[in-house]
Image (spheres, coloured by chain):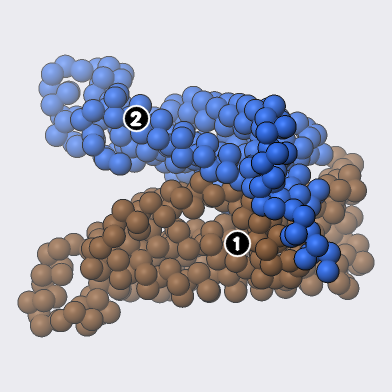
């Protein structure tokens, strides 16, 4: 009976409530973007040297992939729960997990990109007198950029989704609205939070696609 | 260190191994709901991905479904399904099936598209037609990548099933969310250990199954499958 009653008085979106709580959504979105940007940027800064190391020194390749592969298998809920006793309900707890997950996605794509550079190109670069570091910076990394960009897009969209789960440790950005929708048994923040998170993912993906087209115009892959 | 001792004590406490909130019962709930969801998703997704890949139709749909799947917040789907269907397993299974379908469709589509055209031509030259070519030549070749898709989905389903406890469901998520609610970090940590162990066990056992299912003739091709399969994480 309670259910039927609720559906009568609680529409999926109460526009009046929405219009009176714009600052709440702004704060949620801001936190969502901040958590995502930190995770992707730090993850990228870590994964570029790791990916290059795995490419240059075969010895590191499988251990690096294995360690982060295992880390990636750990469910985020479990990972946040592991950290809470040590780092509390904090952004540190959220970021350790989010950064770790981005690193695996990005290292794999950096590696795939570098390994896809044709041997002929490397021979030609050597023949032109490129030293290893210059060859890496001016030949191999530019040729790996399409794969690296693909990784950044996957990592960004994945992170935007995972940020919502940090709602269980008091963060979550739009995920906090989703969670409050459950706690308060009130549909509007649930629907708005879901829409914000999905919209953010699509906008970020689109923006990165444009950035990719502009900076790597020779690779027209979606 | 004292804290980890408490966690160890929790695991050795007989009370945590029996009854409705005991580890065996929670394990059974977690595995049952995950297995059901993966099976339903496989029945829907694999024929779809294989058909799309075989006929080479709707490629954008097959690829983009994974991108859409990544963008959907699992916690939102499970809560919205709960608001619609109420208590019980239904909302959980719906959410898990929805999240498990995209990687399976994309991986089986990509696998079928990547079958070497020379091999298809050779098959036709040997007299294989339509369905026979698909079943006896193409499908054995795509087992590694299709299995990688199933494995990715299954690990994510096990991970996401943890969220069932948010809407009154069972499984190992119970320990995590009860621990969080009561600030009982011992139970929280123990629950996390169990969830992570189950995800790892899923990954390992499906890798083993994959090894058994891959025809001996194409073992050499097996290694790149996990590298080529797109990463996917929903929880």
Height in image: B103 above or below B138? above
- Asked whether residue A52 appears in the rendered view, the answer is yes
Q: Secondary structure at mark 2?
A: helix
The quadrant of the image that shows the C terminus of chain A is top left
Q: Position of residue A115 (x, y in %)?
A: 29, 39
Q: CA distance from mark 2 to mark 1?
A: 32 Å
Left or right side of B134 for B11: right
The residue that disc 2 covers is A210
Name the quadrant containing residue B178.
Answer: bottom right
Name the foreground residue: A192 vs B201: A192
Name the foreground residue: B77 vs B153: B77
Left or right side of A98 for A61: left
Q: Residue at x 81, y 48 (%)?
A: A184
Chain A visual colour: blue
Left or right side of B77 for B86: right
The residue that disc 1 covers is B95
Q: Residue at x 58, y 41 (%)?
A: A197
Height in image: A156 above or below A141? below
Q: Position of residue A165 (x, y in %)?
A: 67, 45
Name the foreground residue: B148 vs A52: B148
Q: Position of residue A46 (x, y in %)?
A: 51, 27
Left or right side of B86 for A215: left
Q: Residue at x 80, y 34 (%)?
A: A88
Q: Position of residue A47 (x, y in %)?
A: 47, 31
Q: Residue at x 89, y 41 (%)?
A: B2
């Amino acid at each position: 009976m309670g259910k039927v009653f609720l559906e009568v008085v609680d529409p999926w979106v109460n526009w009046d409530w929405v219009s009176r709580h714009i600052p709440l959504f702004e704060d949620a979105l801001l936190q969502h973007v901040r958590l995502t940007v930190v995770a992707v940027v730090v993850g990228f800064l870590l994964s570029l040297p790791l990916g290059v190391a795995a490419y240059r020194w075969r010895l590191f390749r499988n251990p690096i992939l294995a360690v982060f592969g295992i880390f990636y298998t750990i469910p985020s809920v479990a990972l946040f729960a592991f950290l809470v006793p040590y780092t509390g309900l904090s952004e540190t707890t959220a970021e350790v997990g989010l950064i770790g997950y981005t690193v695996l996605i990005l290292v794999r794509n950096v590696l795939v990109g570098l390994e896809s550079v044709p041997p002929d190109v490397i021979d030609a670069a050597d023949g032109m007198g490129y030293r290893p570091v210059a060859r890496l910076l001016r030949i191999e990394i530019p040729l790996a950029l399409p794969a690296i960009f693909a990784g950044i897009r996957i990592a960004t969209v994945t992170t935007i989704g995972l940020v919502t789960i940090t709602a269980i440790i008091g963060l979550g950005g739009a995920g906090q609205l989703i969670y409050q929708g459950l706690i308060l048994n009130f549909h509007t923040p649930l629907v708005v939070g879901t829409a914000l998170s999905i919209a953010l993912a699509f906008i970020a993906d689109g923006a990165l696609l444009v950035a990719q087209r502009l900076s790597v115009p020779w690779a027209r892959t979606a | 260190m004292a804290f980890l001792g408490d966690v160890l004590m929790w695991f050795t406490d007989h009370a945590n191994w029996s009854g409705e909130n005991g580890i065996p019962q929670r394990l059974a709930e977690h595995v049952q709901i995950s297995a059901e969801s993966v099976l339903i998703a496989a029945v829907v997704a694999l024929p779809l991905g294989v058909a799309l890949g075989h006929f080479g139709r709707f490629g954008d749909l097959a690829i983009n479904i994974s991108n859409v799947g990544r963008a959907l917040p699992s916690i939102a789907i499970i809560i919205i399904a709960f608001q619609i269907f109420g208590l019980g397993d239904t909302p959980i299974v719906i959410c898990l099936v929805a999240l498990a379908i995209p990687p399976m469709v994309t991986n089986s589509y990509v696998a079928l598209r990547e079958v070497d055209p020379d091999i298809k031509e050779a098959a036709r030259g040997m007299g294989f037609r339509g369905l026979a070519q698909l079943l006896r030549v193409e499908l054995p070749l795509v087992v590694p990548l299709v299995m990688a898709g199933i494995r990715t989905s299954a690990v994510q389903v096990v991970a996401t099933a943890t969220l069932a406890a948010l809407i009154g469901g069972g499984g190992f998520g119970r320990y995590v969310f009860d621990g969080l609610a009561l600030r009982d970090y011992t139970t929280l940590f123990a629950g996390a250990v169990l969830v992570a162990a189950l995800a790892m066990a899923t990954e390992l056992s499906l890798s083993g199954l994959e090894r058994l299912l891959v025809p001996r003739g194409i073992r050499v091709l097996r290694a790149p499958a996990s590298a080529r399969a797109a990463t996917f994480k929903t929880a």
